[in-house]
Image (cartoon, grey):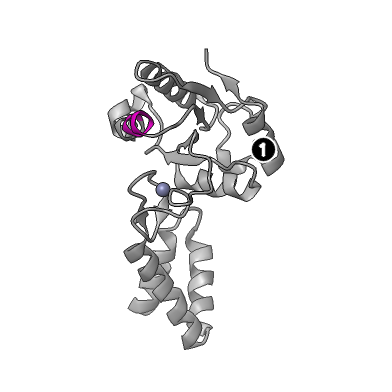
Amino acid sequence: MYPQSLNDLIESFKMLPGIGEKTAERLAFFLVNEDEEKTKFFADSITNAKEKIHACEVCNNLTDQDVCDICSNSLRDNTILCVVEDPKSIFLFEKIGTFNGKYHVLDGLISPLDGIDPDDIGIEKLVKRVREEKFKEVIIAVKPSIEGETTALYIKKILEGIKDVKVTRIASGIPMGTEIEYIDSMTLERALSDRKEIN
Ligand SMILES: [Zn+2]
């Protein structure tokens, strides 16, 4: 049996996605053998991130300010909005670097089978934004899946009713069910540039 504090550390690592017992033990042993400065930095980073990182007031991206860097950047194109399903997707699109519009992060995707309705994913905040801002095109860049299609169609339908805005969907070429984060950047870039209007 491990000492309690070491056990706590192992249990903490096991909370992380993809970390099992063996890896958790290896990481815990690694850390207790590191010098104090490094482990303090590690511990402080967790506390700081948790304390300071929250959703951007405008787009729900992760930020340590009220409004994120992308929303407050006046050099970005404010006529085109890319709707994603999580903040991670923004980092992926930013890494490609070809998209220069704004983003909006949904809180997941509509999934009637799981009881997840439009209200649950924050569609209202998106609608309000499209109504108030100057977007001419809204790109739905969520993963190709039944939930993704349902969400895209719902957004298209609801936005059509309020404003003359083109609603597009990133192109296929991405297999159904693939998580955005596993798509290589070239495919993702092509999917973005070959986007199609939703019919
Ligand atoms: Zn933002």
Q: Determine if the magenta segment contains residue 128.
A: yes
Label 1: how many residues lie within 10 Å, few (<14), some (14-19) or many (20+)?
Answer: some
Residue 94 within the magenta-colored segment of the rendering: no
Task: State whether residue 115 appears in this view.
Answer: no
- What secondary structure is found at the residue carrying circle 1? helix
Front residue (pair 189, 179): 189
The image shows a total of numbered marks equal to 1
As drawn, is 45 to the left or to the right of 177?
A: left
Q: Residue furthest right?
A: 186
Q: Main secondary structure of the magenta part?
A: helix
Residue 198 visible, this orientation: yes
Residue occupying image coordinates x 45% and y 25%? 147
Q: Nearer the viewer, residue 146 or 71?
A: 71
Instruction: Say left or right for 174 vs 76.
Output: right
Q: State the residue lying farthest toward the top.
A: 199
Q: Is residue 7 above or below residue 161?
A: below
**The residue stretch that appears in magenta:** 127-132
Q: Based on the displayed image, in which of its 4 quarters is residue 180 positioned? A: top right
> Looking at the image, which is closer to me, 106 or 72?
72
Q: Which quarter of the rendered picture does the N terminus lie within?
A: bottom left
Residue drawn at the location 43% of the way across and 81% of the way down: 40
The spot of residue 161 in percent (x, y) is 35, 15
Q: Position of residue 57 (x, y in %)?
A: 32, 48
Above/below status of 58 relative to 110: below
Q: Position of residue 14 (x, y in %)?
A: 43, 61
Establish whether ligand 1 lies closer than 8 Å to the Cβ of label 1.
no
Q: Residue at x 54, y 23 (%)?
A: 168
Asked if residue 111 lies left or right of residue 171, the reply is: left
Where is residue 44? Give x, y as percent.
40, 75
User: In the image, what residue type sits under mark 1?
Assistant: Glu
Residue with the mark numbered 1: 189
